[in-house]
Amino acid sequence: MELDEAPPELTERERAALAAYWRANVRLLALLLSLWFAVSFGCGILFVDALNRVRIPGSGFKLGFWFAQQGAIYAFIALIFAYVVLMNRLDRRFGFDER
Amino acid sequence: MDVQAWTTLIVGLTFALYIGIAIRTRAGSTGEFYVAGGGVPPLANGMATAADWMSAASFISMAGIISFRGLDASIYLMGWTGGYVLLALLLAPYLRKFGRFTVPDFVGDRYDSRAARLVAVVAALFVSFTYVAGQMRGVGVVFGRFLGVGIETGVLIGMVVVFVYAVLGGMKGITYTQVAQYCVLIFAYLVPAIFISLYVAGHAVPQLGLGSTVSGTSTFLLDRLDGLHRELGFPLYTERNTPRLELFCATLALMVGTAGLPHVIIRFYTVPRVRDARLSAGWALVFIALLYTTAPAIAVFARTNLLDTVAGKPYADMPEWFRKWEATGLIRFEDRNGDGLIQTVGPGYVDPATGLPMQNELRVDNDIMVLANPEIAGLPNWVIGLVAAGGLAAALSTAAGLLLVISTSISHDLLKRTLLPRISERGELWAARAAAAVGVAIAGWLGIDPPGFVSEVVAFAFGLAAASFFPTIFLGIFSRRTNRQGAIAGMLVGLVFTAAYIAWFKFIHPELDSRANYLFGISPIGIGAVGMALNFAVALVVSRLFPPPPEHIQRLVSSVRIPRGAGEAHEISVP
């Protein structure tokens, strides 16, 4: 099954821009996904027992418990919106944004 | 008005609303039927995605599960929200740029292979049917509990409603009914939660009430609950009681499965631009988090309330709601030692007075925490009607999204792209409607008489999505070198391994279903994480044994990586 509307061949310049854009994108993803891993698997599972010895001041929350049932979810939201802003900026910088 | 009258009124009004929306948003083309014409604004798509995603189980059962498992139930909270980060960062924008109609479309086109498309169709159908049967069952149960009709009648009413808007409206009808259903379900979830939070913790925001003190004392609510647990011999609520590896794998499988579920992925084909796909994943998570951060608060309020009301108290003094839910079988009390008191105790509890072990006498169903909340907090009857309407909204919106996946898998992937490439647009639209109608009938039948595999919906749906779709789509975007041989081998190994592991412990040898017999102690819910790793490993290795994908596929990958030029989702003409 051939695609009859196969995307057009990129020019040499576009190819170089795409490679640079993609490297920047992957770096951003690696940064955001490490934070994603740290707040959920890190604070909520692997280090939950240690963090549970600390309390959020003025509340009944043990820190590990709070991360696992509240904090990780808030952090996920923040990560997606950070991604939206940074990625739109990256698109514009490389001229790949939608007009 | 009594509870029954309020419930009938509120449920009737919401159903009329859904059908009214469906009639106004009928689909006229396959583009409208499959992806709502690609014109859904990101905020509306976020809301529709949230309703699509949150099922009868999220609405009715999740708070109860958390309330019984405490910290360990975080696998569901993190697993079912963290998947949206993966979806937003790794899949949604690229699939939107790709811009076709279904998940098998991407798999089939990217790997240039009919076989890969068919494997994806089979996986999508199996996952969706398992999941939709649970939703229809949920509809029947809500009707049964609140309106006193049988489960069969309840399922039939649900089938008629879903039929009207899924078959007529397709994705366009479903999207706007889901927006309405989200509003109904979140209102129905938050109203009782806010009241019970005021009642237990004296705080109007449940998420903050969870961390505050018990009304009128200086003891923190969570400390009070841990104290009750210690006293009664239950494991501590805020501490970990399951091995880390199991929590890790289960959370990972649920996250990756969430990102790989076809009915969630196709929602991102409906927005106009790539950046809208990114943004609407963010909005979806905001709307989901509103319920998911409230659930752990309800869990703690309800658990504390329940233990305070019943533990060690005389059966004769129980309030009215206790008797009412006892009549439905959701609460069961058996006075084993004949002392007339309700002993609700953990395993290995020793009676301090006699020094003898004591048995638990109370069984409470998970669902009670949400269903009985309004009564425990002494709320008016209309709130109870609202909770019923919310549960139905959650079940129906998810069922509709799944039916759409079933219908497009048949009409688009199987007919148009495989068997009958020359089918006309009108013919394909009618085939989509017919497939949706047959899908509704099968879903109803599975809901009335659920076969065994339906009860393992969490393990099957998420495990299989994690082990098949996620790695295959991810590699399709992020690794140019992955070719059709690698993708097909990876999907098959992931699917077969995961399905066999679940079937082994759930159906073939249910007597072995315990941690001691598991592979590395990983339960069937967590095994999807291993299936995913196998899929990745096999796909990467096998791809290296065969030539790289041809030039036009390389160009497709380049094009998917750049946002510029994403038009409306469209049909490609097949020569």
Image: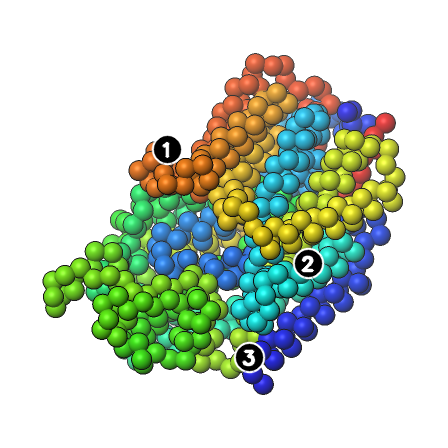
Q: Nearer the viewer, residue B217 or B128?
A: B128
Residue drawn at x 36%, y 59% as measured from the top left:
B68
The picture places residue B464, in percent across and down from the top left corner, at: 54, 38
| Residue at image mark 1 | B519
**Element under disc 3:** helix
Above or below, B28 against B125 in this view is: below
The answer for how far apart the CA atoms under marks 1 and 3 are is 49 Å
Q: Is residue B220 left or right of residue B382?
A: left
Figure quadrant of the N terminus of chain B? bottom right
Q: Residue furthest bottom?
A: B1
Of residues B277 and B420, the one nearer the viewer is B420
- Amino acid type indicated by mark 2: Met
Identify the subunit bearing mark 1: B
Q: Residues within 10 Å of mark 1 (few under 14, many from 20)?
A: few
Its colouring scheme is rainbow
What is the number of the mark on residue B159? 2
Mark toward the start of the polypeptide (3 vs 2): 3
- Write down the quadrant of residue B156 in the picture: bottom right
Q: Position of residue B274 (x, y in %)?
A: 68, 44
The numbered dot on residue B358 is none
Image mark count: 3
Q: Chain of mark 2?
A: B
Q: Quadrant of the C terminus of chain B?
A: top right
Image-based side of B466 in relation to A19, left or right: left
Can you give x and y, in whole percent of width and height, for residue B210 in the image? 37, 67
- Return the residue at label 3: B3
Q: Chain of mark 3?
A: B
Do dots 1 and 3 share one subunit?
A: yes
Which residue is at a point 59% across and 31% down the rendered structure image? Answer: B472
The answer for how far apart the CA atoms under marks 3 and 2 are is 24 Å
Is disc 3 in contact with disc 2, using a CB cutoff of under 8 Å?
no
